[in-house]
Amino acid sequence: MKAYLILFIGVLSVSFAAIFIRLADAPPLVIAACRLAIASIILIPIAATKARQSLNKLSRHDILLILLSSVFVALHFGLWITSLSYTSIASSVVLVTAHPAFVTVISCFLWGERVNKLAIGGIVVAFAGVILVNYNGFIFGSQAILGDLMALIAGFAMGAYLIIGRQLRAQIDILSYLSILYTCSAVILLIATLSFGYNLFGYSNTTYLMMILLALVPQLIGHSTLNLAVRLIPVIFVSVAILGEPVGATILGYLILGEAPTANEIAGGLLILGGIFLVMRQKPRIKP
């Protein structure tokens, strides 16, 4: 039950991301870079000593895995937020949430985390809900294809980074892992941001406030608890539960921005929640 509570907090927290991004008036890469940089600045003083000790105990292979995971985190945030400038929110959201299929195959191969027919049906139902939520927003064209490709890669990167976090759960404590992961990802995104000629300064106070909130809520609370969840329950469950983010974002959009959900969003949201419920009914084999 504790693991599911952690998972719920994680999904709820990442649901705020769309709201904060909508209210931030800055280029996508700047938002992504500042999000990770601020999270790192907050986390490093708390975890610096322990992280240094953990690094000394890690093998070269483990360190390479953490660096690889950092690349995937940077790819996920950088490409997904940027994809919204090229394609519709609908296309982007559907493609970036394709990671459960990828995670299911890889986790079955790596750890034998099998899913029954009911759980597979739940994944299909939840993904159908994601498509229904965004049905009217799909666009097509050469520029949209570029954005769709970015979102798809971002989805795979999300799945890969969850899988690596599961793989490293016995090698490094969660606080040290996250401080190293976020810092390396922030450096990668800052280099990319500056390489594309974007400025990190000169934006409104509201934009910087939204970046701070992105770092605190979706990042430090949301993604950190999701990383903790994959250490407690099968990564398949975590990956599918993340599909609840559009539902949470829709509800928060209505409560905070006054954007009333459409009939498609309500029906799709119910499908997503139903699919997640079907997957969660499979009893997880929790690993020590």
Image: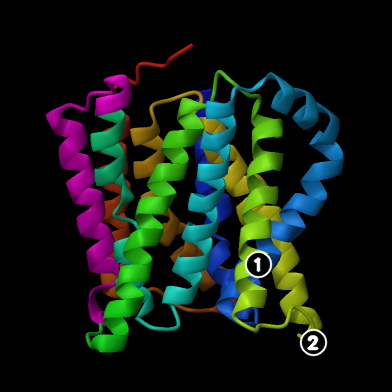
Let me know if residue 210 appears in the view.
Answer: yes
Q: For residue 33, what is the image quadrant?
A: bottom right
Question: For the residue marked with disc 2, what is the amino acid?
Answer: Gly
Q: Which residue is mark 1?
A: 191
Q: For residue 241, what is the image quadrant?
A: top left
Say left or right for 175 vs 246: right
Asked if residue 177 is positioned above or below residue 186 in the image, the reply reads above
Give the SS element for disc 2.
loop
Let me know if residue 281 appears in the view.
Answer: no
Question: Residue 36: x and y, percent?
Answer: 67, 58
Q: Which residue is mark 2?
A: 202
> Along the line of sight, which residue is nearer the eye, 6 or 87?
87
- Mark 2 vs 1, N-terminal side: 1
State which region is magenta: 109-138
Question: Residue 17: x and y, percent?
Answer: 56, 63
The answer to whether mark 2 and mark 1 are in CB contact below 8 A is no
Q: Residue shown at 72%/79% (left/top)?
A: 207
Q: Is residue 173 magenta?
A: no
Q: Residue shown at 39%/73% (left/top)?
A: 261
The CA distance from mark 2 to mark 1 is 18 Å
Name the main secondary structure of what is drawn in magenta: helix
Q: Which disc number belongs to residue 216?
A: none
Q: Residue shown at 72%/83% (left/top)?
A: 199
Asked if residue 236 is positioned above or below residue 89 in the image, the reply reads above
